[in-house]
Amino acid sequence: MVSLNVKPRGRPLRGLPESIEVDLSTATTSEIYSKIAAHTRLDQNRLRITKGSDGSVLSQKHQDGKLVTVEETGLREGSQIFVKDLGPQIAWRTVFLVEYLGPLLIHPLFLGPLRPYLYSASAFNPMSYLPAAINPTTSGVIPPPSQTQQLVCALIFLHFLKREYETIFVHRFSSATMPAFNIFKNSAHYWVLSGFNLAYWLYVPSGVMSASWWPKALEPATNQAVLYGSIALFFFSEFSNYLTHVTLRNLRPSGSTKRSIPRGYGFNLVTCPNYLFETMAWGAITVLAGGNFSAILFLAVAAGQMAVWAKKKERRYRKEFGSAYKKKSSMFPFLW
Ligand SMILES: NC(=O)c1ccc[n+]([C@@H]2O[C@H](COP(=O)([O-])OP(=O)(O)OC[C@H]3O[C@@H](n4cnc5c(N)ncnc54)[C@H](OP(=O)(O)O)[C@@H]3O)[C@@H](O)[C@H]2O)c1
């Protein structure tokens, strides 16, 4: 048996023992976590335990899912460990489900049941005070949505439905939880930018989503090539995005956090083809929406964010896998 000295990192922790004992020949780091959790009565997921010697986090599992033993960590009799309470945690999967639920509900609601309230020029509707040039509200009867609006709503709904499906059945995440407060921060992007913002400006009563600068000849309502071309591009991109997610899933055996070099469809072209195909799908929606500024705003923010992440992932692959990983564009072939 060895005795480990325990101290709080930052704020004092109620119930934290001054030391704990573990059997060096058999104990795993999970045992350390469960002992501290039992003393402090905190969920294990909200504890971060670090080594006093070098500040590194005591992980509970190797990438292949096997448990880490105390002996492997280098902890010995009298070693110091620090414990930090990360606060209430929430499962990553829950965060994703909540994030996508926003636009999934907002679009059909804005197109249908809420339409009469959102666009009527009543004193209670803050939008009716917008400058005339961009004011979509009307004091007359609000007509039903146009066919293009219904189509765009259906495609956006399908997009987020697919994301929910993938969150539940496809992705194998490496971290179980994150601080609970982050759910608000993470959801804002989807609820506000691709939910409220996009839906409100796409389903305007005039039925015409197109921006004033959008060439009349490229209107999807009148140009069949633009209409069917965009629908085809959307489904091609969504299916390709799904295939890349399946490739990523198959890299990681169930229950592990293993990382490998993804290869095959899309991955031979760029590091993050999932981000490329996602951007193409939103490009198709933007064309169907006739360059509507809210669609352009979401496309730009989403593509910009993914482009930054893709560069980081490219660098991480090179660091992790060295020469086994062939350098390539991170997201846009030959460009980025
Ligand atoms: N429209 C937007 O604003 C926007 C923004 C971002 C993402 N998205 C969409 O959401 C999807 C998921 O995004 P994401 O950023 O989570 O994608 P990601 O980082 O590529 O991860 C997708 C899944 O694959 C796993 N994974 C990634 N690389 C791996 C590797 N080398 N070996 C084993 N497993 C690996 C990840 O696990 P870990 O838990 O280890 O990461 C995660 O479970 C994107 O593909 C995109 O379609 C949309």
Image (cartoon, rainbow, N blue to C red):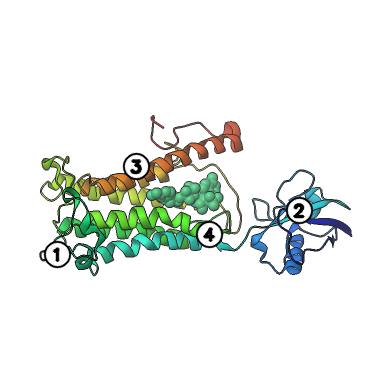
Q: Which residue is mark 1?
A: 144
Q: CA distance from mark 4 to mark 2?
A: 24 Å
Disc on res. 93: none
Number of numbered callouts drawn:
4
Q: CA distance from mark 3 to mark 4?
A: 26 Å
Q: Are marks 2 and 1 in contact (CB under 8 Å)?
A: no
User: Relative to 205, is 85 on the left or the right?
Assistant: right
Task: Work out which quarter of the rendered image holds the N terminus and state it.
Answer: bottom right
| Vertical relation: 212 (above or below) 207 | above
- The percent position of residue 160, horizontal first and vertical second, equals 36, 58
N-terminal of the two: label 3 or label 4? 4
Q: What residue appears at the point 46 percent right and 32 percent down from the top-left corner?
A: 328
Q: Is mark 3 within 8 Å of ligand 1?
A: no
N-terminal of the two: label 3 or label 1? 1
User: Relative to 61, is 321 on the left or the right?
Assistant: left
Q: Which residue is mark 4?
A: 181
Disc on res. 300: 3
Q: Which residue is mark 2?
A: 82
Numbered disc 2: secondary structure: strand
Q: Is mark 1 within 8 Å of ligand 1?
A: no
Q: Are marks 3 and 4 in contact (CB under 8 Å)?
A: no
Q: What residue appears at the point 42 percent right and 38 percent down from the top-left corner?
A: 331
Q: CA distance from mark 4 to mark 1?
A: 39 Å
Q: CA distance from mark 3 to mark 2?
A: 43 Å
Q: Nearer the viewer, residue 36 or 71?
A: 36
